[in-house]
Image: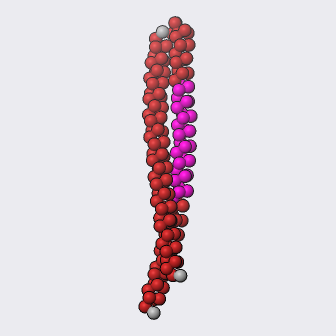
Amino acid sequence: IWQINAQLCQSFVEHMSHQRDACLSECRDYQRAAQEKQREIDVLNLKLRHAEKQSNALANASLAELTDQLGQSDVRMQMLSASIELKDSEMQALCRELARKGMETEDYLGQVRIIQERLRDSEKIIDQLRISLGICQSDKDSVEKE
């Protein structure tokens, strides 16, 4: 009986170890995905800053030009406004994309936390099984001595 219990405990420990390894692998996958999403967010942030610089440069240049050419500014101002609106639309699209990527990253991080909790639970079970295995081994040794 003790041999069967020991074998069952050993099998269960091996099973739980495989589960733990699978959880660790899944956790690493989610961490990689979260890092990838963070890289995408960083790229979008760079694009957003670039668009802001372009928009600011365009607005500053436009203001100086409009000041110098006030008499003919009506037609030019309409063209520049359209350009600014286009840049603003691009910035808004980038902001929406950035917010979406941020939410995706939060989702991945939530999944990583869940997997980490599962991993801690599995490690607790494995520790308990190792203790049980030690007790079974001790019982076995006692029986063998008798």
Residue range of the region highlighted in magenta in the rendering: 88-116
Give the residue at x 52% y 53%. Answer: 112
Say above or below: 8 vs 38: below
The residue sitting at 47% across, 38% down in the picture is: 40
- Above or below residue 91? Residue 118 is below
Residue 142 location (% of width, % of height): 45, 89
Q: In the image shown, does 72 or 49 lie closer to the viewer?
A: 49
Residue 112 falls within the magenta-colored stretch: yes
Q: Is residue 42 left or right of residue 75?
A: left
Residue drawn where x is 47% and y is 88% of the image: 143
Q: Can residue 131 be seen in this view?
A: no
Towards the viewer: 133 or 108: 133
Q: Indicate the position of residue 91 as horizontal and vertical percent values.
A: 52, 29
Please determine whether, in this image, residue 31 is positioned above or below residue 11: above
Residue furthest bottom as drawn: 146
Residue 58 appears at what percent x and percent y? 46, 20
Q: Is residue 134 above or below residue 89?
A: below
Seen at 45% across and 24% down, the residue is 54
